[in-house]
């Protein structure tokens, strides 16, 4: 894992990069963090099992965890961040620049958490670039489970509970080690959350790749009842496949908790499923199986 910078049409985005020993990689995972974090969210240091960057490279994937516009290297030039549509344009430019200089394997999978999930959907809706395999998001529904007036308000313990859930869900050193991961929330992002019902109605129907949605057991920001999920998945009408997963023993910040390894393995399993589907599209059909001789059965074709 190493720090990197990427030029996104004149905007410098920083981030973290891990690459596999094998060349080329199976695919590229572009990871987009939530509000008040940076790309280090996907490289949790409190325990060896928590880092997506380490696990992804070990399993043959390149993982690029970008600091979204308004975070990391771009925070000085974009102190309030960018609105959702502009941010999606910047991230697409960053991915295009990165893939022009680095092998991306069979394509890219967008992985987004919380506010980064909304950016991932917006990036996918107007995708241009290498093959887009799918979108995998967590910490993002469509209907808020809290009143909009609670957004952006520091309410002490209540805010901590919604962001993290029970503290036992996280390795003991999480909050000491995550000081470099936490960052001020880019101000323009509050309007994205408050306006997500309207924005999602415009964006989600334009996503044309498989989508996986993960809800943590202790997710407190977004509704996940049956009618909430039906409303959300119903808008993903152009996606050829939509998977909804519920992750036990996890809070909103899934990738920093004990459940991170299970979650990241599921992300990579979804990437493998998307790779298989993409390969199958261009693969010729198998010929008919040979007919066994009369009086016998071929092993594996109904025999014992």
Image: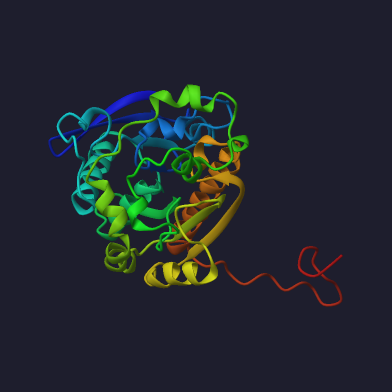
Q: Is residue 7 left or right of residue 233?
A: left
- Residue 296 in the image, given as x and y percentages of width and height: 85, 72
Q: Is residue 274 left or right of residue 261?
A: left
Instruction: Give the camera-side residue of 274 and 195.
Output: 195
Q: In this view of the protein, can residue 31 be seen by the observer? A: yes
Q: Is residue 3 left or right of residue 88?
A: right
Q: Is residue 258 left or right of residue 116?
A: right
Q: In this view of the protein, can residue 131 be seen by the observer? A: no
Instruction: Give the camera-side residue of 168 and 11.
Output: 168
State the residue at coordinates (56%, 66%): 286
Instruction: Give the camera-side residue of 227 and 269.
Output: 227
Among the 4 quarters of the image, the one containing residue 63:
top left
Quadrant that contains the C terminus? bottom right
Instruction: Give the camera-side residue of 288 and 256.
Output: 256
- Residue 214 in the image, given as x and y percentages of width and height: 51, 54
Quadrant that contains the N terminus? top left
Relative to 193, does residue 285 appear above or below in the rendering?
A: below
Relative to 304, does residue 135 appear above or below in the rendering?
A: above
Q: Colour scheme used in the picture?
A: rainbow
From this viewpoint, which residue is outermost toward the bottom? 294
Among the 4 quarters of the image, the one containing residue 201:
bottom left
Relative to 58, does residue 133 appear above or below in the rendering?
A: below
From this viewpoint, which residue is outermost toward the left? 10
State the residue at coordinates (63%, 35%): 168
Relative to 18, does residue 157 appear above or below in the rendering?
A: below
- Residue 64 in the image, given as x and y percentages of width and height: 37, 36
- Residue 60 in the image, given as x and y percentages of width and height: 50, 36
State the residue at coordinates (53%, 33%): 55
State the residue at coordinates (45%, 35%): 42
């Amino acid at each position: 894992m190493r720090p990197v910078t990427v030029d996104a049409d004149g905007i410098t985005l920083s981030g973290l990069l891990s690459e596999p020993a094998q060349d080329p990689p199976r695919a590229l995972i572009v990871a987009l963090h939530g509000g008040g974090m940076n790309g280090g969210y996907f490289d949790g240091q409190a325990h060896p099992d928590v880092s997506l960057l380490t696990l992804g490279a070990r399993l043959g994937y390149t993982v690029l965890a970008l600091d979204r516009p308004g975070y990391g290297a771009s925070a000085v030039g974009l102190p309030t961040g960018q609105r959702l549509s502009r941010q999606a344009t910047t991230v697409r430019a960053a991915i295009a620049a990165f893939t022009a200089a680095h092998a991306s394997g069979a394509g890219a999978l967008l992985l987004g958490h919380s506010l980064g999930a909304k950016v991932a959907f917006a990036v996918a809706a107007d995708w241009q670039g290498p093959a887009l395999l799918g979108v995998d998001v967590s910490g993002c529904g469509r209907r808020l489970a809290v009143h909009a007036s609670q957004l952006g308000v520091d309410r002490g313990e209540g805010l901590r509970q919604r962001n993290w859930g029970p503290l036992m869900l996280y390795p003991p050193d999480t909050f000491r080690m995550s000081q470099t991961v936490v960052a001020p929330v880019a101000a323009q992002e509050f309007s994205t959350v408050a306006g997500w019902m309207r924005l999602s109605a415009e964006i989600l129907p334009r996503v044309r790749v498989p989508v996986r949605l993960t809800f943590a057991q202790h997710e407190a920001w977004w509704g996940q009842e049956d009618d909430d999920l039906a409303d959300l998945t119903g808008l993903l009408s152009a996606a050829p496949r939509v998977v909804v997963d519920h992750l036990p023993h996890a809070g909103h910040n899934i990738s920093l908790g004990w459940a991170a390894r299970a979650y990241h393995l599921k992300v990579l399993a979804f990437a493998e499923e998307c790779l298989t589907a993409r390969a199958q599209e261009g693969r010729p059909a198998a010929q008919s199986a040979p007919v066994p001789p009369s009086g016998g059965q071929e092993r594996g074709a109904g025999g014992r």
